[in-house]
Image: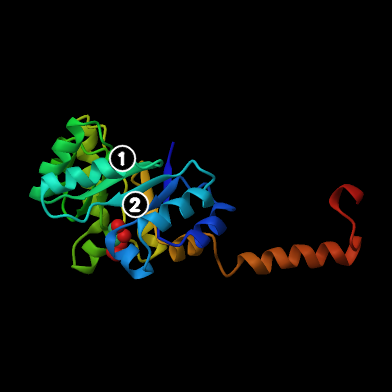
Amino acid sequence: MFEFYLDTADATKVLQLNQSLPIYGVTTNPSILAQAGLGISTVLPAMDKALGGSARMHVQVVTQTAEAMLVEARQLQALPYDIVVKVPATSVGLAAIKLMKAEGITVLATAIYTAQQGFLAALCGADYLAPYVNRIEAMGSDGVGVVADIQTLLVRHHFAAKLLPASFKNTLQVMDVLQLGVAAITIPVDIAEQMMAHPAVQPAVDQFTQDWQAVFGDRSVVES
Ligand code: G3P
């Protein structure tokens, strides 16, 4: 099943978008939480409520050593939610991922800018891989290409890790990544809203309404 996440700390927006979209869960990072001024003690219960108690939530560690990250991961896993622990795919982070996987903790390797980073994180047992599409492209490289390369490596090496690309600034980036057949994605609220919008849609719907009412007035379709 495809996993569609929103990359946000805004539970009100998640509640609103979940009415139209099958939201699998939410992803956060330290910057998102800091910008919202909300910690996980606020965000996790709010998201859980917004998504009806069945949401998968990705929360990033904020410590700097593998041992400290493992302690954070254990604390996060003990919370009464379906939590995936996000760990930056640095050398320290890879060490932390190995420790976490030895304890059966579900892990997402984040801050992936290269295919080799993605490969190594998968080799260490990461359950999810989050390449940063827009950030890679903002540096003049091929963000979608990095995702494609990791996807190829996952298949060729029979890794179970799921690609969960992150960092999007437009719908074209999202569609390019979806074309690759990734297992999951996380996008900001504004991009999700843009995916449902097109300037021609509402005028078309308005024309249907106008044409109908001109002939049938307020009658419903079964009354016509
Ligand atoms: O969690 C990673 C993702 O949120 C990064 O997105 O927009 O800060 O590049 P962005």
Indicate which disc residue 54 carries.
none
Q: Secondary structure at mark 2?
A: helix
Q: For this view, does 117 lie left or right of residue 110?
A: left
Q: Please report the residue visible at 62 percent of the width from the left and 64 percent of the height from the top.
A: 201
Picture layout, residue 153 above or below residue 169? above
Disc 1 from disc 2: Cα separation: 30 Å
| Spot occupied by residue 55 in the image (x, y as percentages of width and height) | 45, 44
Residue type at tag 1 = Gln
Q: For this view, does 214 lie left or right of residue 77?
A: right
Q: How is the image coloured?
A: rainbow
| Spot occupied by residue 38 in the image (x, y as percentages of width and height) | 38, 64
Q: Which residue is mark 1?
A: 77
Nearest to the observer: residue 58 or residue 207: 58
Can you see residue 68? yes
Rendering quarter of residue 135: bottom left
Q: Give the number of marks.
A: 2
| Spot occupied by residue 193 in the image (x, y as percentages of width and height) | 50, 63
Sort mark 1 into few (<14), some (14-19) or many (20+) by Cα contacts within 10 Å: some
Can you see residue 6? no
Q: Please report the residue visible at 25 percent of the width from the left and 40 percent of the height from the top.
A: 74
| Spot occupied by residue 216 in the image (x, y as percentages of width and height) | 90, 60
Quadrant that contains the N terminus: top left
Indicate which disc residue 177 carries.
2
Q: Please report the residue visible at 31 percent of the width from the left and 67 percent of the height from the top.
A: 34
Between circles 1 and 2, the one closer to the viewer is 1
Nearest to the observer: residue 118 or residue 171: 118
Of the two numbered discs 1 and 2 on the same chain, state the one appearing first in sequence: 1
Q: Please report the residue visible at 50 percent of the width from the left and 57 percent of the height from the top.
A: 14
Q: Secondary structure at mark 1?
A: helix
Q: For this view, does 71 lie left or right of residue 190?
A: left
